[in-house]
Image: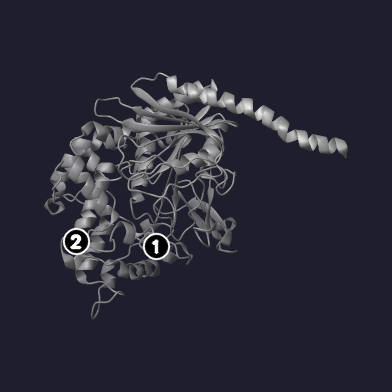
Amino acid sequence: MRKILVYAFLYPVLIAAVSVPWAAAEQESCDSLAKLALPNTKITLAQLVPAGSFVAPQTSPPRNPPNFKDVPAFCRVTAEIAPTTDSDIKIEVWMPAAGWNGRFRGEGNGGFAGVIGYLGMAAEVKLGYATGGTDTGHTTTDAVWALGHPEKVIDFGNRGVHEMTAKAKAIVTAYYGNKPHYSYFASCSDGGREALMEAQRFPEDYDGILAGAPANYWTHLLVNAMWDLRATTLDPASYIPAAKISAISAAVLAACDAADGLRDGLVNDPRQCHFDPGTMICAQEDSNSCLTAPQAAALKNIYAGPHDSAGRLLFPGYVPGGEEGGGGWPLWITGNAPGRSLIAFFSVGYFTNMVYEKADWDYKTFDIDQATKLADAKTADALNSTNPDLSPFMKRGGKLILYHGWSDAAISPLNSIDYYQSVESKMGEGIAHSFTRLYMAPGMQHCGGGPGPNVFGEYPGDPNNDPGHNIYVALEKWVEGGSAPSSIIATKYVDDGNRTKGVRMTRPLCPYPQIAWYKGSGDTNDAANFVCAMGKK
């Protein structure tokens, strides 16, 4: 017993004796990165952050910086990159002080960027990844920074993420003495656009790329946003208030929910839904359960998508089935008042500051032919990642997985199908299938949420470490072991914000063009009772 007590007493002393020189060595190793010389780069901080002590800086707009109590010790490097005289690309690189898994993960952005994704970087460090993020060259989340700054538009469009990646990997190599064995990029929305930009223009940056709901056809996506804004606001009678969205959703489900043979509150393949807004026109007085004729016309235009004066479709319209919910049309399309939606924020910001470059530009003067031509001429090269030729990425062994929610109210899910099919057409279906996959998620809204199964993993362990349940783990297995993914099991929780309340349903996500079909027996909330098979295109 005395020996045990002596050992018990000495153990923390011995640990402390070992820990002090280890921590000092790590601090010295991290500090030394402040002297690292990289092209067009000024390192502004190199500091060992003790476990649980990191607090994110304030960003714009002001937010309460979250504490990261369970993040292990890491070496934090901040830097400013100036590839042009008008560039100020801020980046951060975080590297676990112990337990590095040999991988690097780039963190993407959303919207107009302007902030570094600290929450994502923290999640990555906790899992043993070295990681890097960037604000893409500006520090506000609107588009005012772009007015009169074409180089900053390029930084935002493609140069910022590439510069971050190249410099981050150099910093990681200097810190560990070894370059990353594998590098990955996983992000959604504008981050999905960034992901495809990396695959197309900088194929040497990443071995595996996960692109969710990509805003890759940026110029025409924002033409579509302006089309929808004008459809619902130019004539005040056309505005569809948020109070009517529930009725629209109910009418869509009544018309299309059972098209796959199963009434489950989801439109499994909205391309087969031929809902006519005209059926909702009020028979008598206006109410929240029906639409006026101008509202029905506006709704029809939103589903149809923008067409130029010659009748050519410029971007796919929204599909029926994604109207209701916290991430649905009241947030993105209708807003809580005319012109108070996210499509208004993004479209007006883009055309004002990047296309017309006039702070007082009036969206009511928008001409679809002229605006589309000017947007493409001025910004397509900087912002669009639509090139279907991924040969350089494929030849170096790169793997690409795309996913998109069928109920996305921000970016039409048909856009991802269009891009995937363009890759198949350019490279051949067999070759494209050898390194790319596309998964469409019924009932999922923009990058998550919605009435359908919407959790299928962006990090290992979410929801678990099985590639059959985790799309990111499936990507790693494909890159590192050559095991191509098949179906991915997605989960819908009773409460999306609190997973401890249990699971509502699971459903397989099938590699496109397959879709999930109910076998005809068994619990319809159990993925085991569904099979992936071809459906109607």
For residue 101, what is the image quadrant?
Answer: top right
Sequence-wise, the earlier of marks 2 and 1 is 2
x, y percent for residue 289: 31, 75
Q: Residue at x 52, y 46 (%)?
A: 457
Vertical order, 306 against 353 (above or below): below
- Crowd band around label 2 with a 10 angstrom C-alpha radius: few (<14), some (14–19), many (20+): some
Give the left or right position of residue 440, taking residue 370 as reference.
Answer: right
Residue 31 shows in this picture: yes
State the residue position of label 1.
325
Residue 502 shows in this picture: no
For residue 408, what is the image quadrant?
Answer: bottom left
Q: Residue at x 72, y 32 (%)?
A: 13
- Crowd band around label 1 with a 10 angstrom C-alpha radius: few (<14), some (14–19), many (20+): some
State the residue position of label 2.
233
Q: Residue at x 36, y 24 (%)?
A: 42
Vertical order, 351 against 478 (above or below): below
Q: Nearer the viewer, residue 511 or 174?
A: 174
- Three-letter amino acid code at disc 1? Gly
- Three-letter amino acid code at disc 2? Thr
Q: Residue at x 33, y 45 (%)?
A: 60
At mark 2, the secondary structure is helix
